[in-house]
Amino acid sequence: MKRISFFIYTLFIPLLLFSCDSGKKEGAESGEKSANAPARQDAEKKKTIVFFGNSLTAAYGLDDPTQGFVGLIQKKIDSLGLNYKVINAGVSGETTSGGNSRIEWLLKQPLDVFVLELGGNDGLRGIPVPETKKNLQAMIDKVHSKYPEAKIVLAGMQIPPNIGQKYASDFRAVYADLAKKNNITLIPFLLEGVGGEAKLNLPDGIHPTAEGHKILAQNVWVIIEDLL
């Protein structure tokens, strides 16, 4: 009987020690998970700003795309410790028709702020103003429908009167009209202070240099900072 008791005792002690050791490991792992949880939660809580546009958004012509106004907006946000991430959805050469075709794919991912920067290429190609306006409205509607709480910002654009003064005037009015109709935020003219300034544009006279993009970033920031 004593031998049996001794056998049970010698068997029980290692199991007890193993159980305690396992509990410590589980406790440590649990502590590590708890410590890492806030970091993961902070990352998950980050809100998203989508810039949906053409070559201006895509920073065409710059060696480093982060020098474009969208990249500079992200740097500004980071410097202020704001919990937002910026997505650059710019495609060079994009028209409002092309944007309207691809926006549904983009809207598969959640967003909190949507900056619509399209129309410039329509103007350069002389696309009828009503068509441009119709496409811009369709994109605004799609964002509203998918994410009703999202804040929408419309980047205004102007074109030189090469095609005619009336066309240029009607084109410019589209952005203010849509902003008022949809009660959304308007950047009056994205290229304010840059358009027509040779030293702030690449040789093509259309796309801003890195210095020009700094001004674009400021034009955008003064409008969107109160939305964040």
Image: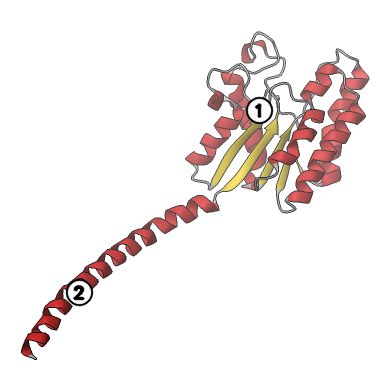
Left or right of 32 in this view: 101: right
The part of the image, by quadrant, that contains residue 214 is top right
At 83% from the left edge and 17% from the top edge, which residue is drawn? 125
- Farthest bottom residue in view: 1
Mark 1 element type: loop
**Residue 104: horizontal and vertical position, in percent?**
75, 41
Relative to 65, residue 163 above or below: above
Relative to 207, residue 76 above or below: below
Task: Give the residue at mark 2.
Answer: 15
Left or right of 11 in this view: 93: right
The part of the image, by quadrant, that contains residue 141 is top right
- Residue 154 appears in the picture as rendered: no
Task: Give the residue at mark 1.
Answer: 57
Which circle's residue, 1 or 2, is located before the other in the chain?
2
At 76% from the left edge and 45% from the top edge, which residue is drawn? 143
Give the amino acid type for the residue marked by disc 2 in the picture: Leu
